[in-house]
Amino acid sequence: MATEIENVNIAHDFFYVGGGYVGPPGREVMSGQMYVEVLRPARVTQRYPLVFVHGTAQTATNWLKTPDGRRGWAYVFAELGYEVFLVDQPARGRSAWHAQLDGELAVAPVAVVERLFTATQQSEWPQAKKHTQWPGSGRKGDPVFDAFYASHVPYVADTAKSQQLFQAAGAALLDKIGEAILITHSQAGPYGWLLADVRPALVKAVVSVEPQGPAVVNMSMQQALKGESQKLDDTQRRRWGIADIPLTYEPALREGEHLSVVRLAATRADRLPAWQQQEPARQLVNLKSVPFLIVTAEASFHAVYDHSTSAFLQQAGVPVTHWYLEDFGIRGNGHMLMLERNSREIAELLHRWIAEI
């Protein structure tokens, strides 16, 4: 099938990667496989393909079309000459979930989606009132919100399990397609560093749009806004700093050992204190040659803590650039910025960075 988009002929395809057969003889099933959708322009002009990875409760549909009917980032980047790969995370969407193998599922309630993503103006973080770019009211009953919420699906509740599943399937994808640039969003943020850690020669760069964070702490937004991050204990600490499964540090962490971390004072009233390693900081040696771009929207809850993730990566020797969209005159966006009114403007800004890789 081919689709005409802005005079660009785009071929569509799909395949599955990763996974394997598990279970007793006669009752085997395949587990861990990942659905991959491909958009291939008739004339590919960009050196590296793009792999888009969605966040919590989402699927690859995030990238295909906005809930108010405009072309999504997948088509925008295909129009710009990129071969585009879109995934449904393992155990999500069109990638099979098995209750006995993948564990409990969670869902995102309407009220949470409204408060965090689409109608944030009355929410608790300082930048929330600046949110203007969501199309429509952002509330249940509005047709644009209803279209967006209808796309939500259950997701594996265990964060570490999700990271393990994607790291394996993502590695299989890169082994198949070769060198690529990752574009991750939200929950998928750690997937970028985890995949680069095991395939550093194949991950040419990572665009991390509002990556899951902040560094070190694992707590709710409500806890963080109340200042409870200062009460950090081992049950709320990400042992690997920016992921919940192992990353390659030098010196290596010993069995059961946590990173030694320190809480820094907040530098601005509208940002949370950041956590970093105590010096001398262990280095993320496999990420030292992979450029990262972290992108933060003006009105998102990530505006209060993405600086922590960026600083943690920099301290660990990772080449990271951090863009705040308002510094480029792009204002009023929330966490689901790829679906908002000015989504194409943001995509074209990201293209400027990607094209230099």
Image (cartoon, rainbow, N blue to C red):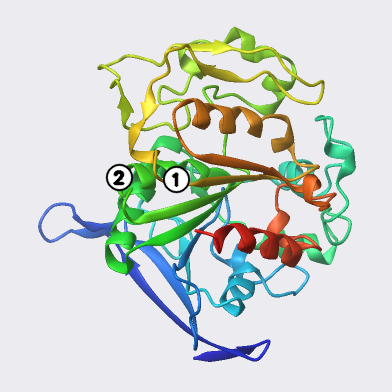
Residue displayed at 47% across by 11% down: 278
Answer with left or right where residue 98 lies relative to residue 313: left
Answer with left or right where residue 272 lies relative to residue 144: left
Tell me, yes or no, whether the two marked residues, 2 and 1, touch with CB atoms within 8 Å: no
Q: Quadrant of residue 257?
A: top left
Name the one closer to the observer, 335 or 93. Answer: 335
From the image, state whether disc 2 or disc 1 is nearer to you.
Answer: 2
Residue displayed at 63% across by 9% down: 230
Instruction: Please rate how many residues cluster around mark 2, counting C-alpha atoms within 10 Å: few if below 14, some from 14 to 19, many from 20.
Output: some
Q: Position of residue 197 (x, y in %)?
A: 34, 42
The residue under label 1 is 191
Name the one closer to the observer, 357 or 324. Answer: 357
Name the one closer to the observer, 75 or 57. Answer: 75
Is 211 drawn above or below residue 43 in the view shown? above
Give amino acid for label 1.
Tyr
The residue under label 2 is 198
Dot 2: element: helix
Q: Position of residue 45 (x, y in %)?
A: 50, 79
Dot 1: element: helix
Give amino acid for label 2.
Val
Q: Position of residue 224 (x, y in %)?
A: 68, 21
Is 76 drawn above or below residue 154 in the view shown? below
Is 99 drawn above or below residue 338 in the view shown? above
Which numbered circle lies on residue 160?
none
Which mark sits nearer the N-terminus, 2 or 1?
1
